[in-house]
């Protein structure tokens, strides 16, 4: 977690470029923020959201022509001024920002303390400036001091370093993302491209082990042995406008409304309607897997549940695993098992850990991700991009919908059984306009007046709609802080029913009119008998709308696509509940967009 920025070559504009970058990276953490400017080293850092730092910057506008910055999601040490980055050595000569975890920091700290070094923070990061300072004190040149220190670090890190009197930025990547932005006469660093998207779209994606020295004349990349590395730059497809709020109150709302376009992009050019075939070329060489194991976390895990349910219906053994569990207690692998990691960011440490565990046991791996060139994309044998565009809101919305479409396309491509995909292709083609219809006509906001002040919210569904029930509850709890739980509808009577009261609305996702739908109707009756109001999220094919107390309608579509529409209704409900409660929707407490620690 955490976000890093860096800028060199912009003269007196440096401080503004850093602050813009931090603002764009705040989704990565908002416990504290700080900047360091050189070449006369000045450090400013503040606990809390970026506005605390902004106030400090406008009160005491620091000058400097080279700089680094950081926005923090706390791992080691509470969110205080003194734990905020950049961290410095005792003399204030070296400033460091860091994303990741230095696993051997206890040993390094003990060694430094034995040498008389005093630590001022509780962070693992602080060992880095002290080690560099020791090396400088031993007479080593700045660049050597940087490399010697990085050589000693174990764990995951993206770091950027500034030294007093030195107009260079030193940076290193190992296990945490770090990208370079290439400007005309300037160089930028970022944990992610939005850090500098207003400045340049030309990007160099660093690999683990790479280290960089940036000067006003450009940058040099070397590997761990300090041998030069050449990496071609790429032009990213999105612009600064794509990462702004475009007039919406929150990124989350903007991203909910971007779904028609995101889904269009995800599907574009990936089907042959005449032939009735999905054409996902990037994976057309993969043979039909004997079994599939999905690994993912949070919202992406719910997409994995959906994918596993679809595959099982087709007749392919499939399971979804929480990545944090899979990494340490992996299930047995049978011959021909494909392990699919679903991860929006492609950087989630738990998911990477699970994928690496699968790789180490010889499994073939595939990443279904949104972020081009992310770690998951680079490490897996295969990659499918969901093409949702940048998602800034901490709560995943458009990427979940796109993950479900990505799963469906992937499944249709790799399953080698004769069938006609025409109905599915038609529904995928109509999906953007069906989502638009939900967005234009949803009564989710009106329901907030009636049910927005409840004791808890429950969500139930069967089959692929279990994933939607769990996702609906996760969305509700993470942004509204209200108690919400999702269940497989059949499980209610085995325990959760005890929680159901007239003050706990139950959202029942009922699509189609098969046995699952009919059995869910029976579950609706069970909760109504306990006095709970029921909101049916339905396409009207069953009697759900007739028996429910309120309804959120979606249009009739393919059974695999209906969960996507139902989920949009639940996204809107959660958003409006949270908004009515005045919650910080884009920055829910204790959370951050991408979790790069285990
Ligand atoms: C939910 O809204 C979250 N953003 C979270 O659960 C997220 O899905 C999870 O942390 C996994 O992230 P990833 O998709 O980037 O791997």
Image: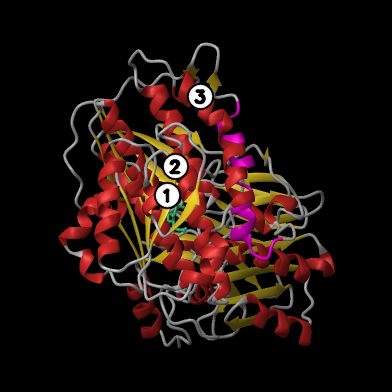
| Image position of 286 with respect to 1: above or below | above
Disc 1 versus disc 3: distance between alpha carbons?
Answer: 28 Å
Dominant SS in magenta: helix
Q: Quadrant of residue 381?
A: top left
**What residue range appears in magenta?**
248-268
Residue that numbered label 3 is attached to: 425
Q: Is residue 263 magenta?
A: yes
1 and 3 marks in contact (CB < 8 Å) = no
Residue 584 visible in the displayed image: no
Q: Quadrant of residue 51?
A: bottom right
Which residue corresponds to the image point at 47% horizontal and 84% vertical from the top-left?
121
Which quarter of the rendered picture does the C terminus lie within?
bottom left
- Earlier residue among tags 3 and 2: 3
> Quick check: is the Cβ at mark 1 less than 8 Å away from ligand 1?
no
Q: Position of residue 298 (x, y in %)?
A: 38, 56
Q: Is residue 206 left or right of residue 528?
A: right
1 and 2 marks in contact (CB < 8 Å) = yes
Which residue corresponds to the image point at 22% horizontal and 51% vertical from the top-left?
490
Residue 540 is tagged as: 2
- Earlier residue among tags 1 and 3: 3
For label 1, count other residues whose C-alpha is less than 10 Å away and answer few (under 14), some (14-19) or many (20+). Answer: many
Residue 545 is tagged as: 1
Disc 1 versus disc 2: distance between alpha carbons?
Answer: 6 Å
Q: Secondary structure at mark 1?
A: helix
């Amino acid at each position: 977690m955490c976000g890093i920025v860096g800028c060199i070559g912009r003269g007196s504009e440096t401080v503004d470029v850093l602050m813009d970058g931090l603002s764009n990276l705040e989704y990565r953490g908002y416990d504290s923020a700080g900047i360091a400017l050189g070449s006369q080293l000045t450090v400013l850092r503040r606990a809390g959201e970026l506005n605390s730092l902004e106030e400090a910057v406008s009160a005491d506008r620091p000058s400097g022509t080279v700089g680094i910055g950081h926005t923090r999601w706390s791992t080691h040490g509470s969110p205080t001024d003194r734990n905020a980055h950049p961290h410095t050595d005792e003399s204030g000569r070296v400033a460091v920002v860091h994303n990741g975890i230095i696993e051997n920091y206890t040993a390094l700290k003990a060694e430094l303390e034995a040498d008389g070094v005093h630590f001022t923070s509780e962070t693992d990061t602080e060992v880095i400036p002290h080690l560099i300072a020791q090396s400088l004190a031993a007479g080593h040149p700045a660049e050597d001091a940087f490399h010697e220190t990085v050589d000693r670090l174990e764990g995951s890190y993206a770091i950027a370093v500034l030294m007093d009197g030195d107009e260079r930025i030193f940076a290193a990547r190992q296990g945490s993302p770090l990208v370079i932005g290439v400007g005309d006469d300037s160089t930028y660093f970022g944990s992610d491209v939005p850090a500098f998207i207003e400045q340049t779209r030309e990007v160099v994606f660093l690999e683990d082990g790479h280290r960089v020295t940036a000067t006003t004349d450009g940058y040099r990349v070397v590997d761990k042995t300090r041998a030069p590395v050449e990496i071609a730059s790429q032009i990213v497809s999105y612009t600064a406008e794509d990462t702004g709020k475009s007039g919406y109150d929150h990124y989350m709302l903007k991203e909910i409304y971007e779904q028609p376009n995101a889904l269009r992009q995800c599907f574009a050019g990936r089907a042959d309607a005449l032939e009735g075939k999905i054409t996902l070329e990037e994976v057309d060489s993969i043979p039909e897997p004997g079994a599939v194991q999905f690994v993912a976390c949070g919202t992406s895990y719910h997409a994995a549940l959906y994918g596993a349910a679809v595959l099982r219906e087709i007749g392919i053994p499939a399971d979804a695993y929480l990545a944090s569990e899979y990494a340490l207690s992996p299930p047995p692998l049978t011959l021909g098992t494909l392990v699919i990691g679903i991860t929006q960011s492609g950087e989630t440490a738990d998911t990477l850990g699970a994928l690496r565990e699968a790789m180490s046991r010889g499994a073939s791996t595939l990443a279904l991700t949104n972020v081009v060139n992310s770690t998951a994309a680079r490490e897996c044998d295969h990659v499918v991009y969901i093409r949702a565009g940048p998602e800034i809101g901490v709560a995943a919305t458009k990427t979940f919908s796109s993950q479900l479409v990505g799963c469906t396309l992937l499944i249709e491509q790799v399953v080698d059984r004769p069938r006609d995909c025409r109905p599915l292709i038609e529904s995928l083609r109509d999906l953007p306009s069906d989502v638009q219809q939900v967005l234009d006509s949803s009564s989710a906001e009106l329901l907030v007046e009636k049910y927005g002040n409840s004791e808890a919210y429950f969500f139930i569904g069967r089959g692929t709609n279990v994933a939607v029930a769990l996702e609906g509850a996760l969305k509700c709890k993470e942004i509204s802080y209200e108690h919400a739980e999702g269940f497989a509808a059949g499980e209610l009577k085995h325990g959760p029913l005890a929680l159901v009261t007239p003050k706990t609305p139950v959202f029942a996702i009922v699509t189609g009119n098969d046995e699952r739908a009919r059995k869910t109707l029976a579950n609706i009756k069970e909760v109504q008998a306990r006095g709970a109001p029921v909101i049916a999220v339905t396409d009207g094919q069953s009697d759900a709308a007739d028996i429910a107390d309120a309804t959120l309608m979606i249009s009739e579509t393919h059974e695999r696509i209906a969960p996507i529409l139902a989920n949009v209704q639940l996204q809107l409900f959660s958003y409006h509940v949270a908004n009515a409660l005045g919650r910080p929707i884009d920055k829910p407490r204790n959370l951050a967009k991408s979790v790069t620690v285990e």
